[in-house]
Image (spheres, helix red, strand yellow):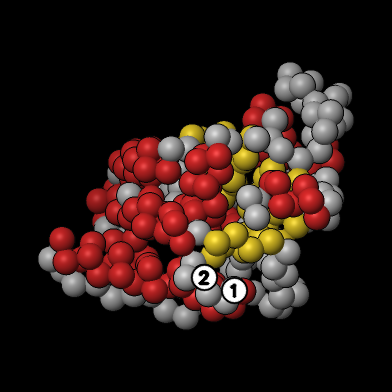
């Protein structure tokens, strides 16, 4: 199977679908993580403001390391971080990306996320969805003959309707590797996220000493990851949940079980 995971930033896929991606790879599926942006604004140190390309380079290196941990591929559309817009050029870039990957399954966040890059990246995928089969649009990338299944990864937003868990994947067997994938993005999980005041405040507080900082971050991420299981499953420590989108192929229950290894 061909699986395409599309996030707005270089670390988005690891935290949301990293466990399921590893399970897909263990089955022999091809998995690609995609970042819509270059990650050039995901930090606070002044040197990255003075030299944003150095942060772009760092985040690409981190993405490659994370991909190696999960044995997945990585690609970036290189949109400027914080400047994702739903326009013709961006939509056509998304169409070409998906067509050239020819996926059976596309995973992404819902278009109701708190971050505008997240929202607009998801909207680009949805706007591309039907056009994937229209050969006269972007004729340089062959149109798909079969529409992929699109699925949203789990979130806790409710203003546009609560997330619906159509599929729940137990990931206990690979949770350690998922967290190692996340921690490969050191600039994010060890620096930016402990600093950044997202809705609800920083993700966690960390000590200053580097090895202790990493150990505590791992503990915090493991604790955070266990929350999904409490919502969706009994007797399972860690899960990832997905909602099937109406915009792609609508799989039968038996196909869903095949797609998601359940």
**Residue 227 visible from this viewpoint:** yes
Please give the name of the residue rendered at 34% of the width and 61% of the height, measured from the top-left corner: 189
Question: How far apart are the two marked residues, 2 and 1, measured between alpha carbons?
Answer: 6 Å
Q: Give me the disc on residue 233.
A: 1
Which image quadrant for residue 191? Answer: bottom left
Please give the label number shown on residue 236: 2
- Asked which quadrant contains residue 197, the reply is bottom left
Identify the residue at image location x=25%, y=51%. 47
- Asked whether disc 2 touches disc 1, contact meaning CB atoms under 8 Å apart, the reply is yes
Locate the N terminus and report the quarter of the image it occupies.
top right
Of helix, strand and loop, which one carries label 2? loop
Describe residue 57's horizontal placement relative to residue 257 as left or right: left
Give how far across and how far down residue 202 sits, in percent. 38, 75
Left or right placement of residue 26 versus residue 186 in this view: right
Of 221 and 99, nearer the camera is 221
Picture layout, residue 53 above or below residue 109: above
């Amino acid at each position: 199977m061909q699986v395409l995971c599309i996030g707005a930033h270089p670390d988005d896929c690891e935290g949301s679908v990293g466990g399921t991606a590893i399970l897909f790879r263990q089955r022999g599926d091809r998995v690609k993580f995609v970042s819509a942006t270059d990650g050039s604004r995901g930090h606070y140190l002044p040197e990255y403001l003075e030299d944003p390309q150095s942060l772009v380079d760092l985040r690409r290196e981190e993405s490659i390391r994370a991909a190696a941990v999960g044995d997945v591929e990585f690609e970036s559309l290189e949109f400027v971080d914080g400047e994702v817009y739903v326009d013709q050029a961006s939509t056509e870039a998304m169409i070409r990306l998906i067509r050239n990957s020819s996926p059976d399954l596309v995973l992404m966040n819902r278009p109701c996320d708190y971050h505008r890059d997240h929202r607009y990246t998801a909207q680009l995928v949805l706007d591309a969805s039907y056009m994937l089969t229209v050969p006269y649009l972007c004729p340089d990338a062959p149109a798909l003959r079969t529409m992929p299944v699109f699925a949203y990864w789990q979130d806790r937003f409710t203003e546009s309707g609560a997330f619906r868990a159509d599929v729940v994947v137990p990931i206990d067997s690979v949770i350690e590797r998922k967290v190692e994938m996340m921690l490969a993005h050191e600039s994010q999980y060890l620096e930016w996220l402990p600093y950044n005041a997202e809705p609800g405040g920083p993700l966690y507080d960390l000590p200053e000493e580097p090895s202790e900082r990493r150990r505590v971050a791992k503990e915090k991420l493991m604790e955070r990851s266990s929350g999904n299981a409490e919502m969706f499953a009994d007797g399972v420590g860690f899960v990832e949940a997905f909602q099937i989108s109406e915009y792609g192929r609508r799989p039968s229950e038996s196909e869903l079980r095949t797609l998601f290894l359940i």
